[in-house]
Image (tube, rainbow, N blue to C red):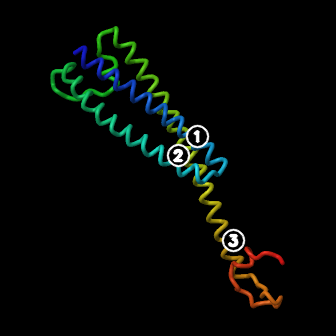
Amino acid sequence: MEKQVNEFYDYLSRLLSSYNSLGDLLSEERQILIKREVNRLEEITEEKQKLLNHIEDLEKEGYKLQQDLSCGLCKDNSVLPLREICNAPPSPYRDKFQDLSFNLKLICSKIVRINKINATLIKKYLDFSSFYIKKMRTLSEDTSTYSSSGKLNAAGGGISILFQKKV
């Protein structure tokens, strides 16, 4: 059983480290969203997806470890929740597990909070983009343009007036 407890503790430590990395990436993403650095946003989204895939693999590994450890702790072969596993080991492990459990809860709440902020920022940018596109369409319908000879073309000449250079 000691081997299972140590393996589960190591797993939780790796999971905590990965969640901390995710929290850092999300904080960086927030700054990128604020600065509107689209190229960097693509890069960090790829990094975040790789890290999320890694966390998913870790959680699958953790479920197996949780099953193994639960079998040693209870007689009915049910899988114990993390909270019960952290409280169940003998006292030398209990404090270590409770510290890890506390830190996992802390980083998870931080991740949720940052993710909500990032989602709000993205929604605001999408709303602004929709507004801008709508205004561009309205402008293109109401605008008259000039030909290269300087004559006035009919209204509805398109959006090209916005991009014409003055000569």
Label whose residue precedes the other's in the sequence (3 or 2): 2
The amino acid sitting under disc 1 is Glu
* Residue 17: image location, x then y, percent: 44, 28
The Cα atoms of the two marked residues, 1 and 2, are separated by 8 Å
The answer to the question of whether label 3 and label 2 lie on touching residues, with beta carbons closer than 8 A, is no
Q: Residue furthest left?
A: 76
Element under disc 3: helix
Examine the rendered structure and indicate whether residue 121 appears above or below residue 157: above
Name the amino acid, label 3.
Answer: Lys
- Could you tell me how far apart the alpha carbons at marks 3 and 2 are, in whole angstroms? 31 Å
Horizontal placement of 96 versus 23: left or right? left
Please determine whether, in this image, residue 1 is positioned above or below residue 43: above
Task: Say the numbered circle drawn on residue 135.
Answer: 3
Identity of the residue drawn at 43% across and 28% down:
16
Asked which quadrant contains residue 101, the reply is: top left
Residue 48, image x and y in percent? 47, 43
Earlier along the polypeptide chain: callout 1 or callout 3? 1
Left or right: 50, with 61 as reference point: right
- Tell whether label 2 touches label 1 (CB within 8 Å): yes
Pointer 2: residues within 10 angstroms few (<14), some, or many (20+)?
some
Residue 124 location, x and y as percent? 62, 54
Measuring 56% from the left and 50% from the top, which residue is drawn there?
Answer: 41
- Residue 49, above or below 9: below
Q: Which residue is mark 2?
A: 44
Q: Residue at x 50, y 38 (%)?
A: 112
Q: Which residue is mark 1?
A: 28
Mark before the other along the chain sequence, 1 or 2? 1
Question: Seen in the image, is 24 located left or right of residue 12?
Answer: right
Label placed on residue 131: none
